[in-house]
Amino acid sequence: MNKAKQQNYSKGKYGEQLAHKYLKNKGYKILAQNWRYSRYGEIDIIALNKNELIFIEVKTRSSINYGNPIEAVDERKMNKILKLAECYINLNPNVNFVACRFDIIGVILKQPAQINHYENTYQF
């Protein structure tokens, strides 16, 4: 991995750690982090909050110079996560929930880090 990719990977992992801590502090129960299924890809965080099963994409940026982190989640990415969410539900029939939703957490790594939680950006 070249240096630029390594830095982006490290930033992304740090942003996911901040998002994980943020969600736990809000009372979410984290079921999985970096859940991967075959060649389909990965869901950053899967959590339960009350009776909702939540699939969360985390996007991290150093600044907003190149746009808000949420802008990096396009329809193609959302469809990929939807397929992964269906796989997760089918593989985990013991998880009890009433509804599902798709959230995005945008992390901007300025000091202090800024976390923006966009709930229910895609519902199924």
Image (cartoon, rainbow, N blue to C red):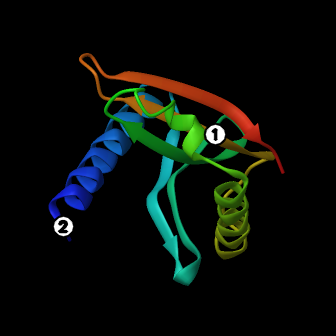
- Farthest front residue? 66
Q: Residue at x 65, y 75 (%)?
A: 91
Q: What residue type is disc 1 on?
A: Asp
Q: Is residue 13 above or below residue 37?
A: above
**Residue 107: which quarter of the image?**
top left
**Residue 39: which quarter of the image?**
bottom right
Q: Is residue 11 above or below residue 36?
A: above
Q: Residue at x 69, y 60 (%)?
A: 76
Whether residue 26 is visible to the viewer of this picture, yes or no, is: no
Q: CA distance from mark 2 to mark 1?
A: 31 Å
Whether residue 12 is visible to the viewer of this picture, yes or no, is: yes
Q: Is residue 99 left or right of residue 110?
A: right
User: Is the N terminus in the top left, top right, bottom left or bottom right quadrant?
Assistant: bottom left
**Residue to which mark 2 is pinned:** 2
The disc placed on residue 28 is none
**Residue 37: which quarter of the image?**
bottom right
Q: Residues within 10 Å of mark 2 (few under 14, many from 20)?
A: few
Provide the secondary structure element on which disc 1 rests: strand
Using the image as rendered, state which of residue 2 and residue 121 is in the foreground: 2
Task: Tell me where residue 85 appears, x and y as whole percent.
Answer: 68, 62
- Farthest left residue? 3
**Residue to which mark 1 is pinned:** 103
Tell which circle, 2 or 1, labels the residue nearer the N-terminal end. 2
Q: Is residue 105 above or below residue 16?
A: above
Which of label 2 and label 1 is nearer to you?
Answer: 2
Q: What residue type is disc 2 on?
A: Asn
Q: Residue at x 21, y 59 (%)?
A: 6
Q: Is residue 109 left or right of residue 19?
A: left
Provide the secondary structure element on which disc 2 rests: loop
Task: Tell me where residue 97 appears, x and y as whole percent.
Answer: 74, 49
Using the image as rendered, state which of residue 45 and residue 39 is in the foreground: 39
